[in-house]
Image (cartoon, grey):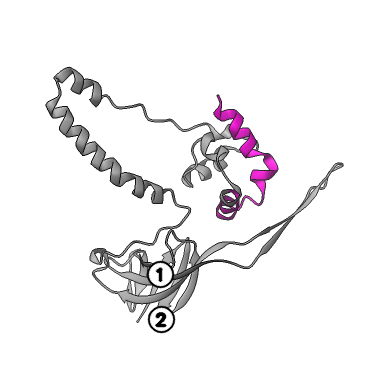
Amino acid sequence: MFAVMKTGGKQYKVQSGDVLRVEKLAAEAGEKVQFNDILMVGSTVGSPMVAGAAVQADVIEQIKGVKTIHFVKRRRKHGSQRTKGHRQQLTLLRVTDILEKGGDKSGVKAAIGAGSVSVAAVVAAKPAKKAAAKKTEAKVEAPKKAEAKKATPKKATSADDLKQLSGVGPALEKKLNEAGVTTFAQIAGWKKADVADMDEKLSFKGRIEREGWIAQAKELAKG
């Protein structure tokens, strides 16, 4: 039996025992992960996904792809040129099982991209729920005035106007927001790996370093 699954924005046709490379996952070697975005299993075609279907795989190791070279040249009076290499981070997997049904009840860890914001959100959500339960119990025992003060929610942090960055317009700002980037503080904290990952995801082709976004974001974040 074969299945067509989706991960990292790409589709893969797999069978049990296949070894494949996918965009880096938040998992360590030896872990078992499950892909739930299944477009097709055998003769069953999803609309768009097959409900309850899943592909399970063992993580063999975290690897890097073949180096690609980016050459940038500015054709101006005081032009410049730059050569930059990049190796995409990948995860090597071995497919173990293809489930037509019951994937949503298997209990196997879902495969999540390493660059996804949801990874940190999932980890942070667990202790947050426990803390919220303890606060609720304390509020019941406390006086009404103290309860009202504790119940006052904090103001949500609003997104920054990323169009203040050099070369960022409404369309590019929308792309950044869709990728989970909404504040100058996020951009100011980017490392080389983050810049390379964003270049790859949104096809920036070195724009982040060329326009000096990180330095600009640090100044703008100060207010």
Task: Read off the residue under disc 2.
Answer: 17
Look at the image and say whether residue 202 sits in the magenta stretch.
yes
Frontmost residue, 56 versus 205: 56
Q: Quadrant of the N terminus?
A: bottom left
Find the residue positioned furthest to the right. 77
Residue plotted at (59% across, 48% down): 195
Q: CA distance from mark 1 to mark 2?
A: 15 Å
Image quarter for residue 17? bottom left
Snapshot quadrant of residue 190: top right
Please tell me in which quadrant of the rendered image residue 173 appears.
top right
Q: Of label 1 and label 2, which has the lower sequence position?
A: 2
Range of residues picked out in magenta: 195-223
SS at badge 2: loop
Secondary-structure class at tag 1: loop
Q: Position of residue 2 (x, y in %)?
A: 37, 79
Between 201 and 152, the one nearer to me in the picture: 152
Dominant secondary structure, magenta? helix
Q: Which amino acid type corresponds to the residue marked 1 in the rendered image? A: Gly
Disc 2 residue type (three-letter)? Gly
Residue 68 position (above or below residue 205): below
Q: For the residue carrying disc 2, how many other residues have a C-alpha within 10 Å: few (<14), some (14-19), or many (20+)? A: few
- Residue beneath the point at 83% across and 45% down: 79
Tell me whether circle 1 and circle 2 mark residues in contact (CB < 8 Å): no
Front of the two marks 1 and 2: 1
Residue labelled with disc 1: 30
Q: Residue 117, relative to residue 169: is it above or below?
A: below
Of all residues shown, which one is farthest toward the top?
145
Question: Which residue does the image show at 15% across and 20% down from the upper left?
Answer: 144
The reply, left or right, for residue 26 in relation to residue 211 is left
Q: Pinpoint residue 84: horizontal percent, then vertical percent.
A: 71, 56
Q: Is residue 118 above or below residue 60?
A: above
